[in-house]
Amino acid sequence: MNNIFDTQIHSAPSLPGRDGGGSIRHLIILGDGMADWHVPSLGGKTLLQYADTPAMDWLACHGRCGRLKTVPDGFHPGSEVANSSILGYDQHVVYEGRGPLEAAAIGVELAPDDLALRCNFVCIEGETLKNHSCGRLETEEAAPLIDYLNDSLASDPRYEGRVRFYTGVQYRHLLVVHGGNKHLRCTPPHDIPGQPWRQHQIEAEMPEAEETAALLRDLVVRSQILLPQHFINKERAREGRDMASSIWPWGGGYRPQMVPLTERFPAIRRGAVITAVDLIRGIGHYAGLRIINVPGATGLFDTDYEAKADAAIEALRSGDDFVYLHVEASDEAGHDGSVPLKLRTIEDLDHRLIQRILDALPSLPPVAIALLPDHPTPCEHRTHTAEPIPFAIFAPGLTPDGVQTFDEDAAVAGSCGLLEGDAFIRLFMCQSSLSPDPSPVREGRKSRAGEDGKEASNFYRTASSDIYPILKDYARVNRKESTLAEDILWQELRRKQLGVLFRRQHPIGDYIADFVCLSIKLIIEVDGEYHNTPTQANEDQQRSDWLQNKGYRVLRFTNEEVVYDTANVIKHIKLKISHPK
């Protein structure tokens, strides 16, 4: 027998093409700030409820829905928190603010004691912060202003060479202070449009940070003297456009310690992020994702939705196992407080991006799709809030849960419930932290009688409750689409013909075993030829290590061995049953 002691079993998402296909790909479509409050002018509906979103509704109707708490208690509802939480990162471990993420996105390497801060260009008129974006400052205008600040401000001897500005995108840039202290109280400028700016100056959270806070306050005040003198701002003023009249540093921190997704999820061998926002590029960088730059992706309502969809389709087709597709437009419309513009961005995302991807699915390898915002950006509030957001997960073979539309209210009735922490990404990737003998409290299921008629010590549900419904559906389809070899072997194993109870297509962790006897932890796998490919062999080894740590033994047979040498296969199985250790 070949590989008789191999300990690999199928991953649940590799259901499509079980005997000749590859693993399922994973695509997250994120509409930044897309969730909203109920709007009186829309008849009391949210924007997702009011907008025409047939593609989003299709995903909800054909998938499973729920809500996700993306902002842990005690954290500001920033996009850096929400997006990294969606990817399963514990904010108490990785959070360092926006600055270091945006530094990574533009290729700025940080020293251990470099404090990196997001640095907006903002428009201040008199004592009021008019807006956080200077009325849509373009990068071509911003770059000379950054050079001007480095020449006229950062080079001042009083800063002793510790300060450096870096060009980012549009109004979003980077400030690095060598030796700066991160314990600062900073206010995001998009939280305070129309408010007196001096009431929101940077403050130290501890005495050791006061020197850094004073330095940053000085930079802000001096920038307000220098920037209006630049010819670009003078030209903007003549044209009646908002000037970039001040810098606004915030979101500071040091280089974060993030474990790449490829090390956390064996199913992700290669992944990509698609976005126009440096912050999200930085998260992708530290998460081990390659950055795909899409011409025409602006981060605003005029972004090229079709180009971003095509980039995601091509990434999935060319071998990326995981794609994080981020669209910023609805968030910016929410910050502007424009209900019509936000409705337009939601409908454009649906019609021009999501529908385009759905139309391409027949030409792609099997793809699981998750759709969600990162946080609400209510037009009435004009900034982020921390309420849970709706999500929908679609996957081939997944039984829908009955939710018919994608919106904040409909998601409440979804079968996935309210998730937090890394539960969403584990659910989406079908990854769980399995305990070999789950407790009835954890699994929500009483134990059945054991094989001797007494109360069983092992519980038959061996996947955690948050992913069990999805794995169960995959297993059901596997049973309906069983191979000839699996059918032949099942006739020999069923009804305790070998003295022990075997289960067929049984979820274990994030895998589905062809056959398993839980009482002696013996798994039997029947494999097609694709397990001989180099890619699959690598996946097999990774999963083998996991299963061995959980105490399982696995017998592996080829289809040909089961069909043409059934007696010898049964002989080997009986030998393992009689010697359980």
Image: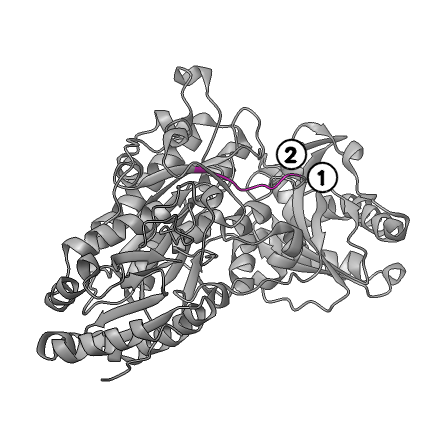
Horizontally, residue 529 falls left or right of residue 311, namely left
Mark 1 sits on what residue? 187
**The quarter of the displayed image where residue 188 is located:** top right
Residue 264 picture location, percent across and down: 49, 64
State whether residue 332 is above or below residue 147.
above
Over which residues does the magenta segment extend?
67-73
The reply to whether discs 2 and 1 touch (Cβ–Cβ < 8 Å) is yes
Residue 181 picture location, percent across and down: 81, 56
Secondary structure, mark 1, is: loop
State whether residue 281 is above or below residue 30.
below
Q: Identify the residue at image location x=71%, y=55%.
A: 253
Amino acid at circle 2: Asp
Q: CA distance from mark 2 to mark 1?
A: 7 Å
Which of 138 and 255 lies nearest the eye of the viewer? Answer: 255
Mark 2 sits on what residue? 191
Amino acid at circle 1: Thr
